[in-house]
Amino acid sequence: MKVTILLICSCLVWGGLGKPQFPDQEKDSLFWNTWAQRTLKNALTLQKLNQNTAKNLILFLGDGMGIPTVTAARILKGQLSRQSGEETQLEMDKFPFVALSKTYNTNAQVADSAGTATAFLCGVKANEGTVGVSAAAVRSQCNTTQGNEVTSILRWAKEAGKSVGIVTTTRVNHATPSAAYAHCVDRDWYSDGEMPAEAVRAGCKDIAMQLFENIPNIDVIMGGGRKYMFPKNQSDVEYPGEKKHFGTRIDRRNLVEEWNNRMKNKNAHYVWNKKELLSLNPNSVDYLLGLFEPGDLPYDLERNNETDPSLTEMVEVAIKILKKNPSGFYLLVEGGRIDHGHHDGKAKQALHEAVEMDRAIGHAGLVTSINDTLTVVTADHSHMFNFGGYTPRGNTIFGLAPMLSDVDQKPFTAILYGNGPGFKVVNGLRENISTLDYEENNYKAQSAVPLSMETHGGEDVVVFAKGPMAHLLHGVHEQNYIPHVMAYAACIGQNRDHCMSSSRASSLSAALPSLTALLTLIRLLC
């Protein structure tokens, strides 16, 4: 009954009165002209390009954060602050340079997170399901690994003397972060417990093992995935009675213990909860391993504020540790559970994850400088998520469209999925959502096609950039272009010639006044 009344009221406001609610100032053309002119002046300041060398590099990756997700998250952010939402700016919206990224994998029109991660971290497009290997490698075929390995920008930064870090809300050995350090023909080989016996015998290594062995001494690692680091059937420190959280390693190795032993006398700390994390003094920490859950971290809406750190809190600690290096740092930050929310059809979870990642982006901007830090925000792929239905200004993003379907005469939410678990038929007809709490955290939005899990979308995704050489991210690019730009900006990897030329030019410029003075003195003496 409550839902029906809200629907009727919404329709009256939109259709009957014909007066959508918006601020009075927006009725004045001067408001819009002034705003546009102010924006124009700001744009004109960008004509002087920032061509500094990037000391620091930060990549924020919203897993599954397609353009509709960005727009809906913007509205949600505003509505959480009691605004209508549409006019709100996300932190990423403030970045001056924007591009589009083509997300397809070498063998897939609609990509997965493993092949895309290889693109935006290693600079090479790859097959779906594979990480840190070229397209010559075939998924799940162990013998196609050797000789097809490709290295990541995280490795390039480490080899250049920078500190490096990985922060994610998923498992640290999940698809996106694993492409930063692993070379694996199957993204699901989290530990040897998930690998075929023949692959283990053939010498292929699981992703958790590679996290600790491939790039020695990654400075900061934070996320979930604890169970993949411990011997099979070893109970978890946080959930000792729950078998699903027990260790999975058949080789009986304790990777956390091995890390602790190797990092003795190196100001290294292992933590597994928020209290331990926030009790650290970053000034006295050089290496940090934080594994806060056996699997993925909880959704932000379900996070225990006492025991589970937020993405923003993890990013804050990571930057404090990494920025101590005078040579700078590279940091990969993944808002990984945006993707999971969409796969489950739980738009509210997905959008709150996106808003939290935007908070982390804002905090990173406060503690770094645009003069020496290149920050890039993008997604690996999109989802079959969208919203519409001629909703009025300020309509709650999780609310109803202001009309009934003219086919089945039932209400529908603005948010819908093209496919997924929200498809439901009752007595041969589409379910009537008037009886449901469609603003509940775990409500599964209706979908057109029934699937147990919603799928990725195939359209381009946005790339936002600010800082040194950010202007090189413009127009429409292949996804693998991204790490090449970041490496060029920081003078790491294969693009270093311009840095040496710039350095020589700078030295010559600095020497010219002294040389001129010397020549003048010689003329006077002669």
Image: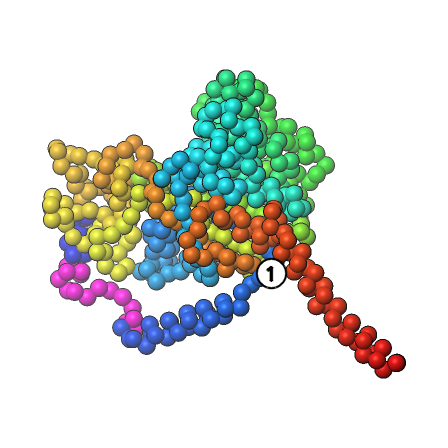
Q: How far across and how far down the image is residue 101, in percent?
A: 42, 49
> Badge 1 local density, few (<14 within 10 Å), some, or many (20+)?
some
Q: Which residue is drawn at 56% across and 28% down?
A: 146
Pick the front one: 61 or 364: 61
Pick the front one: 47 or 192: 47
Pick the front one: 8 or 460: 460
Q: Residue at x 54, y 17 (%)?
A: 201
Q: How far across and how far down the image is residue 267, in percent?
A: 69, 40
Per the rendered image, the range of residues in magenta is: 12-26
The residue to which callout 1 is attached is 52
On the rendered image, what quadrant is the C terminus found in?
bottom right
Q: How far across and how far down the image is residue 207, in percent?
A: 53, 30
Pick the front one: 59 or 130: 130
**In magenta segment, residue 118:** no
On the image, which quarter does residue 429 sit in? top left
What type is the residue that disc 1 sits on? Asn
Tag 1, which secondary structure? loop
Numbered-mark total: 1
Q: Where 203 sits versus 449, above or below? A: above
Taking the image as shown, residue 253 lies to the left or right of residue 198, namely: right
Q: Residue at x 52, y 23 (%)?
A: 143
Taking the image as shown, residue 81 lies to the left or right of residue 491, namely: left
